[in-house]
Image (tube, rainbow, N blue to C red):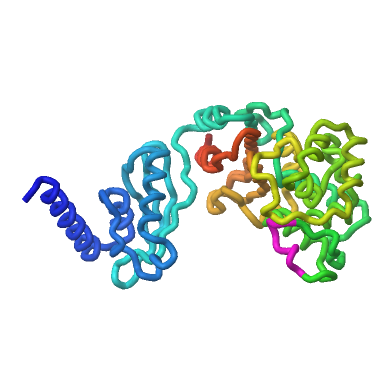
């Protein structure tokens, strides 16, 4: 028998032995360890229903990608269905479910949490390409900051300014949270969201619009609130973003073929921008596929990390901010208020947290790269690590 044939035979025998071992000694922790330690993943380790949705090769690619980015596998800790996979430079929360025959029926890897203390994570964020800003406040005192007063493009995190304008209108008696309005066709925008698919004239409350705008970043709900409260009211909250464009207007500006309009907007003053809004009024909403593939970070809403923390401080008691916890682990905190923003070349996380001992934290991280789409995971893993460090006392 030739050398290559002997090696192939030995590998085949090894795989058979591993499969038999997995089936005979199957428990979720053992199976997780096997996924990372085996030289090759065997499709026999998975239930047919799982493989119909996720091929074994895709699981292998994902694990290889994690190890390439965060180092080699070290261990698995946990019990039941919830585990922590420890790599050299990160911890990966994971869930694994076995069927009655000991095969993997469910597998989920959550975003990794990078290893290192708070200062190391701040350094990792500041080293990302493009422009970054970060601010970590505890009871109002800065634990870390970098470009905290620099206005950067924040995507949907700017919807906090809309929420504040609505709240002020409610407090002034101009609107009521329970007030019902009919859904207007002119408010329709592109996803994210669900309201763009709802029938015209569907009755919705102001509170419903606010909840959808914040919890799932519904763009149609956002534009509805901008129209209802008035563009000028939002501009009072964030004068830098005057005129404050709706999401529909931004989508039109970001559509392919509108490069001259985008350039004019980016370079123009308030009067020039208001003229553009008048010119595009009534233009059809583009299809999602018509949006520019390259980053368009100069046609955006701009807020600093400190401004976002202040908005969170003022608004954190509103129910809409507590529906979606973002990337924070709800079990670790008494209260979580969250809003983020993500577009090509733009990522923002804004979270206000309350510890069981009453300590409040605000953590804002923004990343802009006008040259290329960004790798969301690079910021997410460090941001989650900062939240974990705060949970553990800094």
Image vertical order of residue 366 relative to residue 94, above or below: above
Residue at the front extreme of this rendering? 257
Q: Is residue 196 magenta?
A: yes
Residue 369 position within the rendered picture, expressed as x and y whole percent measured from the top left: 63, 34
Q: Nearer the viewer, residue 197 or 356?
A: 197
Q: How many marks?
A: 0
Q: Nearer the viewer, residue 75 or 47?
A: 47
Whether residue 309 is situated above or below residue 176 in the rendered picture = above
Which residue is at a point 66% across and 30% down the rendered structure image? 141
As drawn, is 229 to the left or to the right of 188?
A: right
Residue 173, given in percent of the width and then of the height, sits at 93, 55
Q: Is residue 319 visible?
A: no
The residue at the point 82 percent across, 38 percent down is: 241
- Return the residue nearer the eye: 309 or 214: 214
What residue sits 34% from the left and 49% below the top?
76
Q: Measured from the top left, where is residue 75 in percent x and y? A: 32, 45
Horizontal side of residue 376 vs 170, given as left or right: left
Q: Position of residue 351 (x, y in %)?
A: 64, 44
In this rendered view, identify the residue nearer to me: 9 or 95: 9
Q: In the figure, 169 relative to 307: above or below?
A: below
Q: Which residues are magenta?
A: 190-198
Q: On the image, which quarter does residue 16 sit in?
A: bottom left
Residue 221: in magenta span:
no
Q: Predominant secondary structure in magenta?
A: loop
Question: Is residue 206 at all visible to an observer of this figure?
Answer: yes
């Amino acid at each position: 028998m030739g050398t290559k044939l002997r090696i192939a035979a030995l590998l085949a025998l090894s795989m058979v032995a591993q499969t038999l071992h997995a089936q005979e000694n199957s428990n979720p922790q053992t199976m997780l360890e096997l996924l990372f330690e085996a030289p090759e993943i065997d499709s026999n380790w998975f239930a047919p229903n799982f493989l119909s949705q996720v091929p074994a090769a895709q699981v292998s690619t994902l694990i290889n990608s994690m190890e390439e980015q965060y180092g080699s596998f070290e261990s698995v800790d946990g019990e039941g269905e919830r585990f922590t996979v420890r790599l050299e430079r990160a911890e990966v929360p994971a869930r694994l479910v076995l069927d009655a025959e000991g095969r993997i029926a469910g597998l989920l890897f959550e975003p990794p949490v990078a290893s290192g203390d708070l200062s190391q994570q701040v350094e990792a964020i500041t080293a990302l390409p493009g422009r970054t800003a970060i601010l970590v406040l505890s009871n109002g005192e800065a634990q870390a900051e970098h470009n905290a007063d620099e206005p950067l493009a924040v995507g949907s995190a700017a919807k906090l300014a809309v929420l504040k304008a609505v709240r002020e209108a409610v407090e002034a008696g101009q609107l009521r949270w329970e007030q019902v309005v009919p859904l207007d066709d002119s408010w329709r925008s592109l996803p994210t969201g669900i309201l763009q698919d709802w029938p015209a004239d569907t009755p919705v409350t102001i509170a419903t619009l606010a909840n959808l705008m914040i919890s799932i970043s519904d763009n149609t709900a956002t534009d509805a609130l901008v129209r209802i409260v008035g563009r000028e009211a939002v501009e009072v909250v964030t004068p830098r973003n005057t005129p404050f464009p709706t999401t529909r207007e931004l989508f039109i500006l970001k559509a392919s073929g509108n490069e001259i309009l985008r350039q004019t907007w980016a370079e123009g003053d308030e009067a020039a921008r208001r003229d553009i809004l008048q010119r595009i009024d009534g233009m059809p909403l583009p299809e999602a596929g018509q949006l520019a593939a390259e980053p368009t970070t100069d046609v955006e809403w701009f807020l600093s990390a400190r401004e976002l923390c202040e908005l969170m401080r003022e608004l954190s008691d509103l129910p809409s901010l507590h529906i979606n916890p973002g990337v924070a682990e709800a079990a670790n905190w008494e209260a979580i208020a969250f809003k983020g923003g993500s577009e090509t070349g733009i990522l923002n996380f804004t979270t206000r947290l309350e510890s069981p001992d009453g300590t409040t934290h605000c953590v804002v991280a923004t990343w802009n790269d006008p040259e290329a789409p960004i790798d969301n995971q690079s910021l997410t893993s460090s941001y989650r690590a900062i939240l974990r460090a705060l949970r553990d006392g800094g």
